[in-house]
Amino acid sequence: MSRSVAADLMIVGARQVILCDPAQTDGLGILEDTAVAVHGREITAIAPLADLRSISGPATIIVDAAGGIVTPGLVDCHTHLMFAGDRSDEYLLRATGLDDSALTAAGVAWGVGASQAANIGLSAEALVQSALPRAQRMLASGTTTLETKSGYALEHASDLASLEAAQIVAQRTGLEIVGTYLGAHARPREGAGQYLDRMIADTLPEVADRALAEFCDVYVDPDVFTVAECARVLRAAADLGLRAKLHTDARVNIGGGKLAAEMGAVSVDHGNMLSDEDLRALAEAGTSVAFFPGFDWAVGHRHPVDARRLVCSGVPVAIGTDLCPVCWHLSQQMSMGFATRLSGLTPAEALLGVTINAARAIGRDDRIGSIAVGKQADLAIFEVPDYRQLAFRFGANMAACVIKNGRVLVERKTNELRGD
């Protein structure tokens, strides 16, 4: 597995190189005594170090994994990175046992609408300043690509500003950030029809014309938008070249899974209440199901996703943080821990869920999410002796080095105490 070109960068000294290729006989592709060579932005060789001496020279940057593991850069396929403020009060009340109806009865504002006041009218730069520290922490924990959505101010100019801000954060951090337009995130108290009309007539075309997003997401829920309303938005988006994603069937089965299959959506997100019939349709359509065990835990979901059931259905199973104002969750390492302990996945399935399957859920599995010659050189080195430890040591950041597009963006030394 190599190309005979001089290496700009080479990773050596790894106990395991995890290809994250489900087609391998072990379901992952676990290699020992293996080095990874990079030229430019591309992986050019994966082989024993002795076989790569000829492509290493004085200018080659050598990165020593020091007995750790090498994985693809982690992929977070569902975030709401661009927001100001938070809903920590809501989170803490939910921690006491209050659910949606109890919060409403107590007169507590909750959900997307509760974040509107803090976000409406903010400039792109203001949103950048709010989001940048979160993005930097995500990168430092091994995430090299993430998807983020608009949709907290619920207003034309603010939606555009949030997507502009995402592109600026990408430039300033080196992260690859995939934009998704989510104007249909919460139902306005009045004039929902007119709101959708303007979204379709004005906002979607501008988003597409300015290349601010690749996907259009909608929230299909009895208290948000109906299947018919969401289908209308997604069809308009498709006409403009934006692929479909759906928040759906999180609390009840409303039929969003069926709509996703019909639309050829790239992913169904949340999906707590998907039926067996829905899963069969999604598997046939090639639509991924992305679930968020950290979010289910944070909000005390009554029906956390049974990920074992998803795997057995044959759908590609992706994992995201669902970082948002009520779920301050930044680490896909922690997502792996939640997914194995709470959702029924094996450590191997969890790692695939935050690499190749997450890449598939944002339409990028052809170039990221696995380690292969010719793929983008997005790589992470973790200070663990075995990949299974990532699901066990989820309470700490084990990322020692993070490489994006062949560039070392994060390199830290741990266990060093600075004296007086």
Image: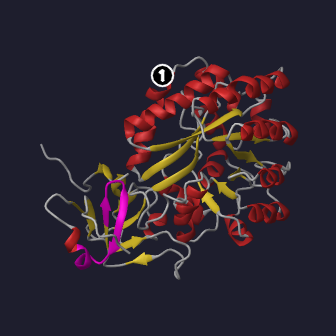
**Magenta range:** 37-52
Front in this rendered view, residue 68 or 57: 57
> In the rendered structure, which amino acid carries the disc numbered 1?
Ala
Residue 218 appearing in the image: no
Instruction: Identify the colour scheme used.
Output: secondary structure
Dot 1, how many residues are within 10 Å of its Cα: few (below 14), some (14-19), or many (20+)? Answer: some
Q: Is residue 193 left or right of residue 87?
A: right
Residue most extreme to the bottom: 25
Query: Looking at the image, which residue is at 73% across and 41% down?
Result: 238
Query: Looking at the image, which residue is at 50% across and 34% down?
Result: 166
- Could you tell me residue 96's position as x and y percent? 66, 42
Query: Looking at the image, which residue is at 37% across and 66% down?
Result: 70
Q: Is residue 79 left or right of residue 155?
A: left
- Could you tell me residue 42's position as x and y percent? 37, 58
- The quadrant the N terminus occupies is bottom left
- The quadrant the C terminus occupies is top left
- Could you tell me residue 334's position as x and y percent? 50, 55
- Could you tell me residue 38's position as x and y percent? 31, 61
Mark 1, residue position:
126
Residue 30 located within the stretch drawn in magenta: no
